[in-house]
Image (spheres, rainbow, N blue to C red):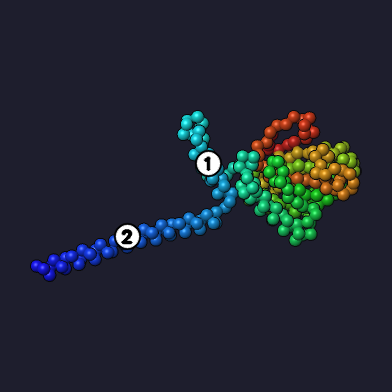
Amino acid sequence: MARHGRRGHAEGGHENAERWLLTYADMITLLMVLFVVMYAISNTDLRKFTALAQSFSAAFNTDVFQGTETITVASGQESAPDAAQFDAGSGIVSSDYRAVEATVRDYAISQGLAGDVSVDRVAEGIAIRIRDTLLFQSGRARLDAPSRQVLARIGGILATLPNPLRIEGHTDDLPPTGPFYRDNWELSTARALAVLDALRDLGIAPDRLAAAGYAGYRPVVANTDDAARARNRRVDILILYAPQSSPSPAATGAPFSIGGLP
C-alpha cells in the first residue's frame, strides 16, 4: 500500500509539471500571430491602409454612439479621399505625390525631358505639368506620334489611381500665332481637349475626365520674358482629391469647361 501511494503521488507531480506546455504553446501561437500581422502591415498598400484607417475613424466617431449622425462605410469600391480632411504629410495625397513624382521624374530623365515634364502639389491635389513644345507645334493643338508616346507613359501612371482628372490648357499672355485659333481661349481649350481625347483612347474612363481652357490667366510665373512665357505655355493634368467648389466666374476668369465634372 505504501508503494502504491508513493507511485500515485509521483504520477500526480508529473502531470502538474507538464502544464507549462499549455502556456508555452499559447505564447508561441500569439507570437506567430504577431509576426504575421507585422508582416502584413509591412506589405500593405499605403493608399488602402490609409483609407481603412479613415473608415475606422468615421465608424468609431463619437457622434455614432450619440445617435446624432448616420455614417456608412463603403466596401468594395475605391473612391478619391478628401485631401483637405485627410492628409497630414503621410496620407494618401502625399503618398501618391511621392510615387507619381518619382515615376515621372525618372521617365523624364531617361528620355531627356527633365525640363519639359514636372509634378507639383496644388490645392486640388497633384498636377503633372507638360510644356506645350513637348506636345504641340506653335499655335496648334494637334498631337503627333512622339507626344502621344509621352502621354501613353503618363496615362499608365494615371490608370493606377481612381481619382477624377482635369486636363487644363494654359498659354502665355501673347496672342496665338497662325490662322487656326482666334484667341488663347480657343487654343488652350483645344489643347486640353486633344490631351483628354488621347487619355480616353489610352483607356482612361471617360467619367474620370474633364477639360478646361484658361488662356493666359493662370500663369505659374509672371510673363516677364521669353523663358517665363515658355513655362506658362503648358498642359496640366490634375489628379483631383479635394471636393471641387463652384467659384464665381469673376474670380476664376470663367474658363470654358467640358467633360465629366461640373
Residue position for label 1: 57
- The quadrant the C terminus occupies is top right
Give the farthest residue toward the left. 1
Decide which of tag 1 and tag 2 comes sooner along the chain: 2
Residue drawn at (75%, 45%), measured in percent from left and top? 236
For this rendering, which residue is in front, 91 or 119? 91
* Residue 193 in view in this figure: no
- Is there CB contact under 8 Å for labels 1 and 2? no
Task: Report x, y in % for residue 133.
Answer: 83, 50
Instruction: Tell me the kind of residue under disc 2.
Output: Leu
Quarter occupied by residue 11: bottom left
Residue drawn at (70%, 53%), measured in percent from left and top? 101
User: Mark 2 falls on what kind of element?
Assistant: helix
Residue drawn at (16%, 65%), measured in percent from left and top? 8
Image position of 157 (left or right of 15): right
Please rate how many residues cluster around mark 2, counting C-alpha atoms within 10 Å: few if below 14, some from 14 to 19, many from 20.
Answer: few
For the residues labelled 1 and 2, the Cα–Cα distance comes to 38 Å
Quarter occupied by residue 87: top right
For this rendering, which residue is in front, 173 or 20? 20
Quarter occupied by residue 12: bottom left
User: Mark 1 falls on what kind of element?
Assistant: helix
- The quadrant the N terminus occupies is bottom left
Residue drawn at (43%, 59%), measured in percent from left and top? 31
Image position of 91 (left or right of 254): left
- Label drawn at residue 256: none
Image position of 51 (left or right of 120): left
Task: Report x, y in % for residue 59.
Answer: 50, 39
Please rate how many residues cluster around mark 1, counting C-alpha atoms within 10 Å: few if below 14, some from 14 to 19, many from 20.
Answer: few
Q: Is residue 77 above or below residue 110?
A: above
Instruction: Tell me the kind of residue under disc 1.
Output: Ser
Residue position for label 2: 22
